[in-house]
Amino acid sequence: AQSVTQPDIHITVSEGASLELRCNYSYGATPYLFWYVQSPGQGLQLLLKYFSGDTLVQGIKGFEAEFKRSQSSFNLRKPSVHWSDAAEYFCAVGARGGGADGLTFGKGTHLIIQP
Amino acid sequence: SQTIHQWPATLVQPVGSPLSLECTVEGTSNPNLYWYRQAAGRGLQLLFYSVGIGQISSEVPQNLSASRPQDRQFILSSKKLLLSDSGFYLCACNRGAYGYTFGSGTRLTVV
């Protein structure tokens, strides 16, 4: 069965500092990996996704993520965070074309930005 | 690109009352459709999955049901709500290379 682990429930970062959110996955086939962001009371916005090719993927809002097959990881990074980045971040794994399992999400990491 | 409309955005319902949440999709045809629930302090749990009209798969046994009366319409229902049904409900669609798109969600509070 597929699963996603986000080991950090909360992370606090100072504005302007760098950020790394961890994600480890378990998937039986070629994983398709996603990072979503959720602001309070809102739906999910796709930050970036990895299907194949270059293991370093660029997303919106200055985020990037690196796929490391040997470590089963897909960590999200940003070189300099802004106060508007405060939100809940979800890593997910699934099949590109959908399928019965849909997306399997981690439990999320709550990002707090200190001024 | 595909767009999902979900309504209502917020709903407060008494225990034992019925529920109907609607999701419609624009910009694509024959999508895979999903209902997810996000309970307070928890991740997203897949509730239902549909590959086409009238075809529904349930991931977990629960007090809820889903229907797909039209290709781009997905409805989440309950005959009698429980307190444990409270949460944030998200509709999602997938259409191959477009990946997954999520609606803006419905916040359901059962009182």
Image: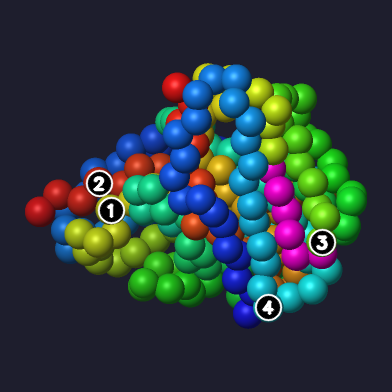
Query: In the rendered view of the protein, which quadrant contains the N terminus of chain B?
Result: bottom right
Q: How far apart are marks 4 and 3 (CA)?
A: 15 Å
Q: With respect to residue B62, does B101 lie above or below? A: below
Residue A28's disc is none
Q: Where is residue B43 in the image (x, y as percent from the top left)?
A: 53, 37
Residue B27's disc is 4
Are the residues under badges 2 and 1 in a single subunit? yes
Quadrant in which residue A10 is drawn:
top left
The first of marks 2 and 1 along the sequence is 1
Q: Distance between the residues labelled 1 and 4?
A: 31 Å
Magenta run includes residue B73: yes
Residue A112's disc is 2
Q: Where is residue B29 in the image (x, y as percent from the top left)?
A: 79, 73
Q: Main secondary structure of the magenta part?
A: strand
Q: Distance between the residues labelled 2 and 3?
A: 42 Å
Q: How far apart are marks 2 and 4 (CA)?
A: 35 Å
**Are there few (<14), some (14-19), or many (20+) residues within 10 Å of tag 4?**
few
Amino acid type, mark 2:
Ile
